[in-house]
Image: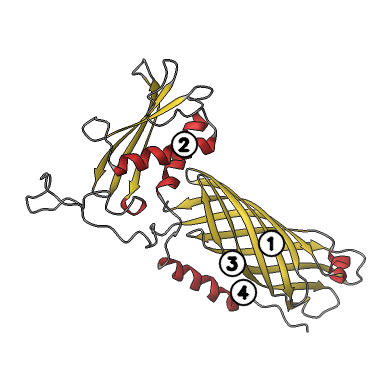
Amino acid sequence: MAKTKHGLSAIRAPFLGLALACVWSGNLHADLEGRLGVLANALAASGAAAGRPVALLSSGPDGSAPNDPLALSLVSGMRRALSATAVAAIQAEGNSGTADALVLVLHYQAVDSGLDLHAELHAAADPAVLWSRRALIPRDDLPAGSLPGPALDDGTAGQEDLQAIPGPPRDAPMRRPLHWDLSLAYKAFLPLNSSFRAVAGGRLDGLSLGVSFCDIFLADLDAYHADLSGQGSLQSLDYEGVDLAVVAPLHLGPATLYAGPGGRFGSIYLNDSSLPQGSVSFGNNAFMAVAGVKAAYRNLGLDLRYGYDFTASYTGYHSLRLGGYYAFGR
């Protein structure tokens, strides 16, 4: 069963393959309400609306209050997003607010890349802005056909009879550009094999360097070291490995829940002073399932993940991973 120590070259190929595959994959769960949820959580975090009723209004490019499907989608989507944050009492539809109410106005204007949305909060009787936030909503996150196509360079741009260019069918997946997260984490390994646990201990503390592609493909480089005592000439053990998983994400504003199957590919190295080469190693691969939650603020976030090994070539683990990440391309 023992074999000489080897590197991780044999397990790097799946890691690179997933990275290339992600280039052709989009985030299938991005939508208008997810974008509005970011604005709602920013308002809740500011505290500007705490304890006061809020009325919602929309304002088109000319400053009027439109009644088109896009305006209705923005207002109803923001209403649901604000209700989820429990930031304040939301006034009923069509109610512009009482004298002590706050008014959240959604100013929007179509641009080539999508919708320029500007949210402003002010008192019903005072135009002074208490809070504001701007967001660009890509075309792919809007209802199909709700915006005219990009401006043409043939002199027809700006004409009133410019027809809306139909978008993709409503059952087509909404896609976002490639994005990925880089994380550094503490990872605790809790062995399931009682014989291994009796030698190595009930908890092995390690480090994990991870990437998440499009919130779907996860890959971690893991390592731990444990000093041993009372085991004769056996001095310590080391672990090096890669965890790979494919998960289904559920986006809830700044939080993302995810779960899915995966695999662990690694080796355990036994450092023994009685051996001429100093150590021996053996493979310890496993089939596992993972579940976790990510919380983000702008490009920074925290990731808490639990893993369970269903089968393993030597010992499986319960694993807990807690780390911080930085998001690229969002």
In this figure, which residue is indicated by the disc labeled 4? 8
Q: How is the image coloured?
A: secondary structure
| Badge 2 element | helix
Q: Which mark is residue 245?
A: 3
Q: In whole angstroms, how far apart are the C-alphas of marks 2 and 3?
A: 31 Å
The residue shown at (49%, 29%) is 46
Up/down of 186 relative to 54, above or below = below
Q: Which quarter of the figure is the N terminus placed in?
A: bottom right
Contact between labelled residues 3 and 2, with CB atoms less than 8 Å apart = no
Q: Which mark is residue 307?
A: 1
Q: Earlier in the sequence, mark 2 or mark 3?
A: 2
In this figure, which residue is indicated by the disc labeled 2? 40
Residue type marked 3: Ala
Contact between labelled residues 1 and 2, with CB atoms less than 8 Å apart = no
Percent position (x, y) of residue 37?
Answer: 46, 42
Q: Give neighbour class at mark 4: few <14, some 14-19, many 20+ (Cα, 10 Å).
A: some
Q: Is residue 79 left or right of residue 184?
A: left
Residue type marked 4: Leu
Q: In whole angstroms, how far apart are the C-alphas of marks 1 and 4?
A: 21 Å
Q: In whole angstroms, how far apart are the C-alphas of marks 2 and 1?
A: 32 Å
Q: Earlier in the sequence, mark 4 or mark 2?
A: 4
Disc nearest the viewer among 2 and 3 = 2
Up/down of 139 relative to 192, above or below = above
Q: In whole angstroms, how far apart are the C-alphas of marks 3 and 4?
A: 18 Å
Q: Earlier in the sequence, mark 1 or mark 4?
A: 4
Frontmost residue, 303 versus 269: 303
Residue type marked 1: Gly
Up/down of 40 relative to 317, above or below = above
Percent position (x, y) of residue 96?
Answer: 37, 24
Q: In whole angstroms, how far apart are the C-alphas of marks 4 and 2?
A: 45 Å
Q: Earlier in the sequence, mark 3 or mark 4?
A: 4
